[in-house]
Image: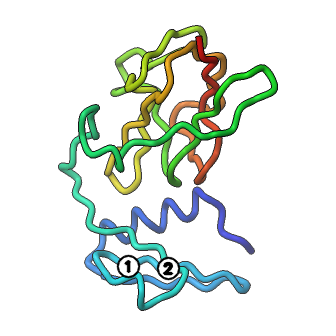
Amino acid sequence: MVLNYKEVAEILKMVDASNCQEVVVDVEGMRLVVRKGGDVSSAPGALDVGSASAETPPATSGEDPSESAVLSDMTDAEGGNYVNAPMVGTFYRRPSPKDAPFVDVGSKVAVGDVLCLIEVMKLYTTIEATCAGEVTAVLVEDTALVEFDQPLFIIREI
């Protein structure tokens, strides 16, 4: 049995909701170490989830650029740039269920425009466009789990 992304996300949510500081899961030669606020250097290959808070609002444009995704150097055959997920998490196309998506296919975007949010343990990361252009593809369904470096959008520069 191998853990899939949904199972890992559930483990992260359970750790966040609990008082435990560390969880180690061994499955068929794979080891997942989740440590809250711990020192990752003591466990090579460990995933440090840091501290999470239910009250943390979504990240917004203008915050520390390290919290925003960067546009991948990959381009598709038609000259579009892929925007990839900077982390594993839940993909949201809209700021709330009642609102319209940040962008749709055909939307024109400028550098810094919000494309989507990715949520990990109630912490939201804003994914922004790093080039001006037109969104030619949305590659992920709303509320789907995404993996690290998974393509999310294709933007054709104009």
* First in sequence: mark 2 vs mark 1: 1
Residue carrying label 1? 35
Comparing 70 with 10, the one in front is 70
Q: Residue furthest bottom?
A: 42
Residue 158's spot in the image, x, y percent?
59, 10
Residue at the extreme left = 55
Quadrant of res 68: top left
Up-down: is 8 above or below 63? below
Which dot, 2 or 1, sits closer to the camera? 2
Q: Can you give x and y, in whole percent of width and height, for residue 47 in the image? A: 47, 73
User: In the displayed structure, does residue 120 sit left or right of residue 108?
Assistant: left
Mark number displayed over residue 59 = none
Query: In the image, is residue 96 above or below residue 121?
Result: above
Residue at 37 percent across and 37 percent down: it is 126
Identified by mark 2, the residue type is: Ala
Q: Amino acid at mark 1?
A: Arg
Helix, strand or loop at disc 2? loop
**At x 38% / y 79%, what residue is drawn?**
35
**Residue 100: horizontal and vertical position, in percent?**
41, 15
- Asked whether disc 2 touches disc 1, contact meaning CB atoms under 8 Å apart, the reply is yes
Q: CA distance from mark 2 to mark 1?
A: 8 Å
Q: Residue at x 42, y 86 (%)?
A: 41
Work out whether 85 lies above or below 36. above
Across and down, in percent, residue 39 comes to: 34, 83
Numbered tag placed on residue 46 in the rendering = 2
The secondary structure type at the circle numbered 1 is strand
